[in-house]
Amino acid sequence: MFSDTLHSITLPSTIKRIEDKCFYFCFRLSSITLPPDLEYIGTETFWHCEALKEIKIPDSVEIIPTGCFRYCFNLSAITLPSSLKSIKSHAFCCCSKLSTITLPEGLEEIDYYAFYCTGIKNLILPLSLNELHSMGLDVREITTPNFLTLCDDYVYRPTQHVTYEIIMFKQGYKWNYIPHPQYAIDDTPEDIIIID
């Protein structure tokens, strides 16, 4: 649903589902209150809601879908539900003002490009996380659970001052010291931690 006049909305408490692209390109939407028993948010629901600044996702939601908040340039605060299991691809892509986010314990998956081009500098991954996909993160510092087991070739893009990159192999994963090309001291990676 495209609208250039919708500024604020409170959804009725009876709503359980928000279908795909429901608020797609509602670029003047700055405030929305979601019903407490909401169970499902569709793909690209808030895509390009440029004026949206904050949102609280009810605890009954388990998935932040593909492209849900993509291009929400002014989104700076979001409360994720304690029930959250998965953050799908591009969910927060290009949310450039989103500088902090708390990932709940119970989260199991961060999909491709989920936090790509956000303002997040530091991120603590919950112990429950077991699947982290390529370019899922775009941060400067990352704290990972020791038993993270499913990734792709690498999971976050080294930005300015980043010196660590996760390299994933089918047999396991390891932390490598890999200087960013722009700040490289030498070309020899040095293994810091190897986890079988």
Image (spheres, rainbow, N blue to C red):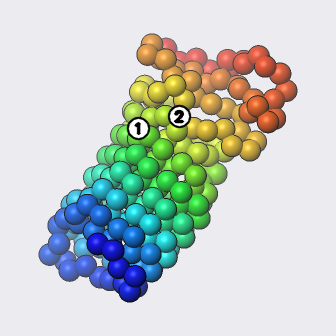
* Circle nearer the viewer, 2 or 1: 2
Cα distance in 3D space between marks 2 and 1: 13 Å
Give left or right: position of 192 versus 169. Answer: right
Up/down of 168 relative to 58, above or below:
above
Q: Residue at x 53, y 57 (%)?
A: 94
In the picture, the disc for residue 155 is 2
Q: Position of residue 185 (x, y in %)?
A: 85, 27
The relative height of residue 15 versus residue 99 in the rendered view (above or below) is below
Going by the numbered disc 1, the residue's amino acid type is: Leu
Residue 137 visible, this orientation: yes
The quadrant in which residue 191 appears is top right
Is 183 drawn above or below residue 48 in the view shown? above
Residue drawn where x is 37% and y is 47% of the image: 88
Q: Which of 107 and 46 lies nearest the eye of the viewer?
A: 46
Residue under circle 1?
Answer: 129
Q: Quadrant of the N terminus?
A: bottom left
